[in-house]
Image (cartoon, helix red, strand yellow):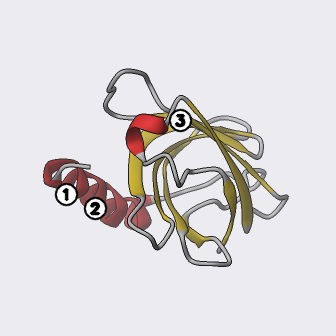
Amino acid sequence: MTDSNKTIFSIAFSMAFGFLAIPAQAIDINGDYKSDDDLLTLRIIALDAKEGNTINAAAQITTSNGNGCAGDVSGVGKVVGNVLKFNSYTTFASKCTLTIKFNKDGSVGNISEKSCLDWHGAQCGFDGRVSK
């Protein structure tokens, strides 16, 4: 992720917490998540509330295996029910798509990736379980 993208993401993250209104039926997915081994992290900002249980959200995932393999990806997507799906802001040879399925209260998410090898090394990935 470029410094410019990190700055934009940080500004959006800071601004979102002051102006956020989430409908009662939507799960609370705002915040920072991490895997039990601290090698996978996820940051989510709900950007606006929509009718029913659909929310636009910005997300950033980072991974590291502790042995030199690391990567990150950011994007904006939609939360429908308890599932967030987003694509990478940028594309390399392919577009990275991430899907995160949350439990009922939004405290635990299971991440799956599609076509994301360009965003991390071969020895690590974005698939995994994260919690607040």
Q: Which residue is mark 3?
A: 86
Q: Which residue is mark 2?
A: 10
Local SS, label 1: helix
Whole-percent x, y for residue 130 in the image: 67, 66
Distance between the alpha carbons at the discs numbered 2 and 3: 18 Å
Judged by depth in the image, the label closer to the viewer, 2 or 3, is 3
Q: Is residue 2 left or right of residue 36?
A: left
Residue that extends furthest to the right in the rendered view of this protein: 104
Give the residue displayed 74% in from the left and 56% down from the top: 24
Local SS, label 3: strand
Give the residue displayed 25% in from the left and 59% down from the top: 11
| Amino acid on which disc 3 is placed | Phe
Q: Nearer the viewer, residue 69 or 46?
A: 69
Residue that extends furthest to the left in the rendered view of this protein: 4
Q: Which residue is mark 1?
A: 7
Q: Is residue 98 left or right of residue 54?
A: left
Q: Is residue 71 left or right of residue 63?
A: left
Give the residue displayed 49% in from the left and 36% down from the top: 116
| Amino acid on which disc 1 is placed | Thr
Q: Residues within 10 Å of mark 3 (few under 14, many from 20)?
A: many
Q: Residues within 10 Å of mark 2 (few under 14, many from 20)?
A: few
Lower position in the chain sequence, tag 3 or tag 1: 1
For residue 98, above or below residue 59: above
Local SS, label 2: helix
Whole-percent x, y for residue 54 in the image: 66, 37
Distance between the alpha carbons at the discs numbered 2 and 1: 5 Å
Q: Nearer the viewer, residue 124 or 83?
A: 124
